[in-house]
Amino acid sequence: MSASPHHHDGSTPLDPAAEDVAPSGARALDDATRLLREQPPHPRAVEIADRVLQRSLRTPRPAELVRGRGAMSFLRVSSLVLVERLREHVDAHLDGGAVGRVLLDVERGGRLDAVTIELLVRYGSDILTLGDRTRRLAAEALAETLGAPADGTELVTMAVSHVHVSDVTVGDPHLVDPSDE
């Protein structure tokens, strides 16, 4: 058996057999990649990227229907609307933190089972205090949107399941780009 093949950057392929099967295809892909990387960016690259982003944002996305609670149990709310409502309400009233991502766990019958709100927090802020405040704000947004539970139970319980520090900001956490990690 010959020495293991290497790409032009010195790395080895994950599956050497794939290159044995179609060596000209792998070389062609490497050549095309190299040529594209050597090209200067298109003068309108940002404009084109913005246009692609705008079109993708207008593309319909699948959503689940979340059942209202209590007197509003007849109501069904799109999970996309609920996520945006939670994000908007928490972001507008949370000092020292910003909403990063909102995840909903919706049961088969449309009952909202859990909400996860990831926060971007300013350095030096009390994470537990921000978590408590976020829980209260989320409960307000859910009660306004889905109605209060008929049995009077608490709409949202808070559990800190994970704290992860991936970056530090001393400025406004609303200006942090979480995809910039």
Image: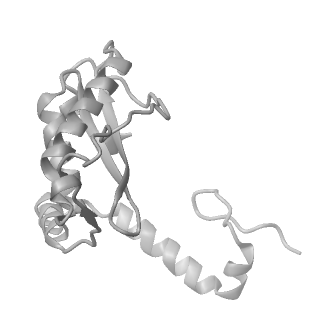
Q: Does residue 23 lie above or below 12 as drawn?
A: below
Q: Give 130 or 9, whichever is nearer the viewer.
A: 130
Q: Does residue 153 lie above or below 38 as drawn?
A: above
Q: Give 65 or 53, whichever is nearer the viewer.
A: 65
Q: Picture coordinates of residue 7 (x, y %)? A: 62, 65
Q: Give 124 or 35, whichever is nearer the viewer.
A: 124
Q: Quadrant of residue 20?
A: bottom right
Whether residue 144 is visible to the viewer of this picture, yes or no, is yes
Q: Quadrant of the N terminus?
A: bottom right
Q: Residue at x 45, y 31 (%)?
A: 160
Q: Quadrant of residue 118?
A: top left
Q: Quadrant of residue 32?
A: bottom left
Q: Picture coordinates of residue 55 (x, y %)? A: 14, 71
Q: Residue at x 30, y 64 (%)?
A: 39
- Image side of residue 52 versus residue 34, left or right: left
- Image side of residue 25 versus residue 155, left or right: right
Whether residue 177 is visible to the viewer of this picture, yes or no, is no
Q: Picture coordinates of residue 157 (x, y %)? A: 38, 36
Q: Does residue 136 lie above or below 100 as drawn?
A: above
Q: Residue at x 14, y 39 (%)?
A: 89
Q: Quadrant of the C terminus?
A: top left
Q: Residue at x 26, y 60 (%)?
A: 40
